[in-house]
Image (cartoon, rainbow, N blue to C red):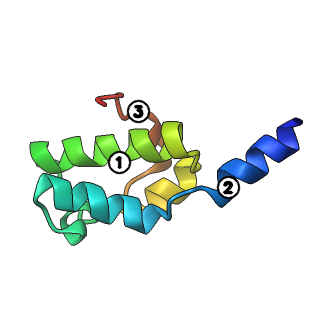
């Protein structure tokens, strides 16, 4: 099994990023729109951090795509500490 096959399977099984954001927001009891607004409320920042970790390290999204979806910078995605 080559690398191309592994990546193809991973991409096919990937959860849509909007679905991931909505699921984490629902679990945390916040509106998904709150996560895309600027601000540093501790709870919202923690939820964003969890989303960044899951999306980048578990699902395989790029920092640029995650940043665009959450309305933060790419470096903000990369600096999110793994809290999961």
| 14 relative to 45, above or below | below
Left or right side of 58 for 19: left
Q: Which residue is mark 3?
A: 79
Identify which residue is drawn at 46% across, 62% down: 17
Number of numbered discs:
3
Which residue is outermost to the right? Answer: 2
With respect to residue 66, does 60 lie above or below?
above
Mark 2 or 1, which is nearer the eye?
Answer: 2
| Residue that numbered label 2 is attached to | 11
Between 69 and 50, the one nearer to me in the picture: 50
Residue 58 at x, y percent in the picture: 50, 39
- Among the two numbered marks 2 and 1 on one chain, the one whose residue lies closer to the N terminus: 2
Return the mark for residue 51.
1
Residue 15 appears in the figure: yes
Disc 1 crowd rating (10 Å Cα; few below 14, some 14-19, many 20+) is: many
Residue 71 appears in the rendering: no
Judged left or right of residue 39, residue 79 is right
Q: Position of residue 51 (x, y in %)?
A: 35, 48
Mark closer to the observer (2, 3): 2
User: Which residue corresponds to the image point at 31% horizontal and 31% vertical from the top-left?
Assistant: 84
- The mark that comes first in sequence, 1 or 3, is 1
* Quarter holding residue 5: top right
Q: Position of residue 54 (x, y in %)?
A: 42, 42
- The kind of secondary structure element at disc 2 is helix
Horizontally, residue 33 falls left or right of residue 29, namely right
Alpha carbon distance from label 1 to label 3? 12 Å
């Amino acid at each position: 099994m080559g690398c191309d096959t592994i990546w193809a399977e991973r991409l096919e099984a990937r959860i849509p990023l909007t679905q991931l954001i909505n699921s984490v927001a629902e679990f945390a009891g916040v509106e998904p729109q709150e996560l895309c607004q600027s601000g540093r409320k501790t709870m919202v920042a923690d939820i964003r951090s969890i989303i960044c970790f899951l999306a980048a390290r578990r699902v395989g999204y790029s920092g640029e795509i995650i940043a665009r979806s959450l309305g933060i910078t790419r470096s903000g995605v990369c600096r999110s500490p793994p809290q999961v």
